[in-house]
Amino acid sequence: MNGIEFKAKPGFKRMHTALKIGYWGGIGLLIAYVCFNLWLGLKPQEMFYAEKGIAHWFFSVPLSDTVTKSVMVPFTYFQPINPDMFDAKNAYLVVSLTNATLVFCAYIYSIGQIRYIIGSILSGNSPFSLANAARLKRLGIIVILYSLLAKLVLNILICLFVTRIFSINLGGIALIGIIIGILVLFVSEIFKYGALLQEEHDSTL
């Protein structure tokens, strides 16, 4: 940009460090959680049990005499069928791993995009760049996709690997998440417009 550097405030460096910790911490937690669940998967089927509540299933496995690990899933995604018709161990692993993987992947990707934006500012670049606009756009898209598809993916995996009963529920769309994603897309267009104006201004100097 014609040698003009953008001076970031000192707080940006702390923010970038925090995002870096959050990014790698998220990856570490995801790996640890997956390994933990794979370890639970080595336990015998008899240790897993399913409990049908009023509107939810509870799938649990005891870790000790006093500690139990449980996951909950609504009937809208897991039909209230007879517990003898499915494997409680498979149900626990599918629900637990799917929820954690989707949440952590969306979190890690989102944190990564924000970290790259802050990093570009710390490098002396203007925040209004086409690269940052593209990062914000990707961030908005991932938020929308997660809000649209997270529960649907869980529903499909339950049908395929647990109940083997085809029953898809499309009511799990998170409207708030979609709205936030759309707003982020709007902001990305503002950044893109700002970048184009900056390029036009620089070309006249």
Image (cartoon, rainbow, N blue to C red):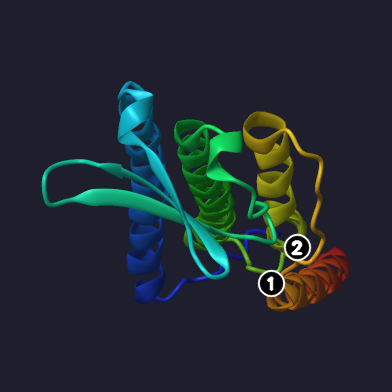
Look at the image and tell me whether residue 205 can be seen.
no
Look at the image and tell me whether residue 156 can be seen.
yes
Q: Of helix, strand and loop, which one carries label 1?
A: helix
- Percent position (x, y) of residue 20? 38, 52
Q: Are marks 2 and 1 in contact (CB under 8 Å)?
A: yes
Which residue is located at x 37 percent, y 55 percent?
A: 22
Q: Is residue 121 left or right of residue 191?
A: left
Instruction: Sort mark 2 into few (<14), some (14-19) or many (20+) by Cα contacts within 10 Å.
Output: many
- The amino acid pointed to by label 2 is Ile
- The amino acid pointed to by label 1 is Gly
Q: In front: 141, or 147? A: 147
Q: In front: 203, or 123? A: 123
CA gap, disc 2 to disc 1?
6 Å
- Percent position (x, y) of residue 144? 75, 62
Q: In front: 25, or 130? A: 25
Residue located beneath label 1 in the image: 177
Label located before the other in sequence (2 or 1) = 2
Q: Quadrant of residue 184?
A: bottom right
Residue located beneath label 2 in the image: 144
Q: Of helix, strand and loop, which one carries label 2?
A: helix
Which residue is located at x 63 percent, y 59 percent?
A: 3
- Location of the N terminus (image quadrant): bottom right
Instruction: Sort mark 1 into few (<14), some (14-19) or many (20+) by Cα contacts within 10 Å.
Output: some
| Picture layout, residue 34 above or below residue 173 | above
